[in-house]
Image (tube, rainbow, N blue to C red):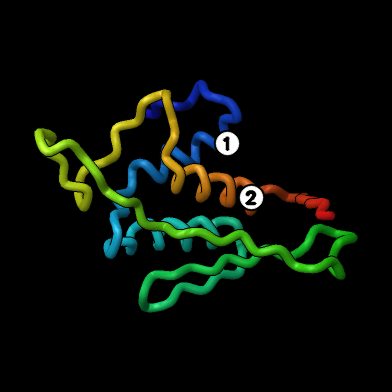
């Protein structure tokens, strides 16, 4: 059952919820790395995944911007796992409990990048 389906923008929070359902602590990034590869495959995007689970996804420029300078969006996939000593939670197996108060930096970065990659036309103006 999805718990964030009523939050806007829906397509952004959908990615966030997907990511929260994938355990991704430091040094255990294989599942989140494979999620990103599947994301690229579903959208027919060029991608590279190395033996350390680093992923590069390439999206071609929007029509009319083929000669513009490329843009890179970079970030880490792992989550720094912290919990209170009295809480029993295995970050390699258990999902993240989602609350409406969302402040998880990594998820925000990945979902924003995922949103940008899924857009059919993307124009970024830089000064």
Instruction: Kindly check if marks 2 and 1 are in contact, taking CB atoms under 8 A apart as contact.
Output: yes
The N terminus appears in which quarter of the rendering? top left
Q: Residues within 10 Å of mark 1 (few under 14, many from 20)?
A: some
Locate the C terminus by quadrant.
bottom right
Residue 108 horizontal/vertical position (percent): 50, 43
Relative horizontal placement of residue 61, taking residue 6 as reference (left or right): right
Left or right, residue 69 beside residue 30: right
Q: Nearer the viewer, residue 89 or 83?
A: 83
Sequence-first tag of 2 and 1: 1
Residue 23 position, x and y percent, is 29, 50
Q: Is residue 92 left or right of residue 45?
A: left
Considering every residue shown, the one lying at the far top of the view is: 6
Between residue 76 and residue 46, name the one nearer to us: 76
Label 2: which secondary element: helix
Q: Residue at x 46, y 40 (%)?
A: 16
Q: Is residue 37 above or below residue 80?
A: below
Specify few, some or many for label 2: CA neighbours under 10 Å numbering under 14, 14-19, or 20 or more: some
- Residue in the image at 27% along x and 62% along y: 28
Percent x, y for residue 18?
Answer: 42, 42
Q: Nearer the viewer, residue 18 or 54?
A: 54
Hey, which quadrant is residue 26 in on the image?
A: bottom left
| Alpha carbon distance from label 2 to label 1 | 10 Å
Q: Residue at x 87, y 70 (%)?
A: 67
Q: Which residue is mark 2?
A: 118
What residue is drawn where x is 61% and y is 59%?
A: 73
Q: Which residue is mark 1?
A: 11
Query: Seen from this angle, which residue lies furthest right?
Result: 64
């Amino acid at each position: 059952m999805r718990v964030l389906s009523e939050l806007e923008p829906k397509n952004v929070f959908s990615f966030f919820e997907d990511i929260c359902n994938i355990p991704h602590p430091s040094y255990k990034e294989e599942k989140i790395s494979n999620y990103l590869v599947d994301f690229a495959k579903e959208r027919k995007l060029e991608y590279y995944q190395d033996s350390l689970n680093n992923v590069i996804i390439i999206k071609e420029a929007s029509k009319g911007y083929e000669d513009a300078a490329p843009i890179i969006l970079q970030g880490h996939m792992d989550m720094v796992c912290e919990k209170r000593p009295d809480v029993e939670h295995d970050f390699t197996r258990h999902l993240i409990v989602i609350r409406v108060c969302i402040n998880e930096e990594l998820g925000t970065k990945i979902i924003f990048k995922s949103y940008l990659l899924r857009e059919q036309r993307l124009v970024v103006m830089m000064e």
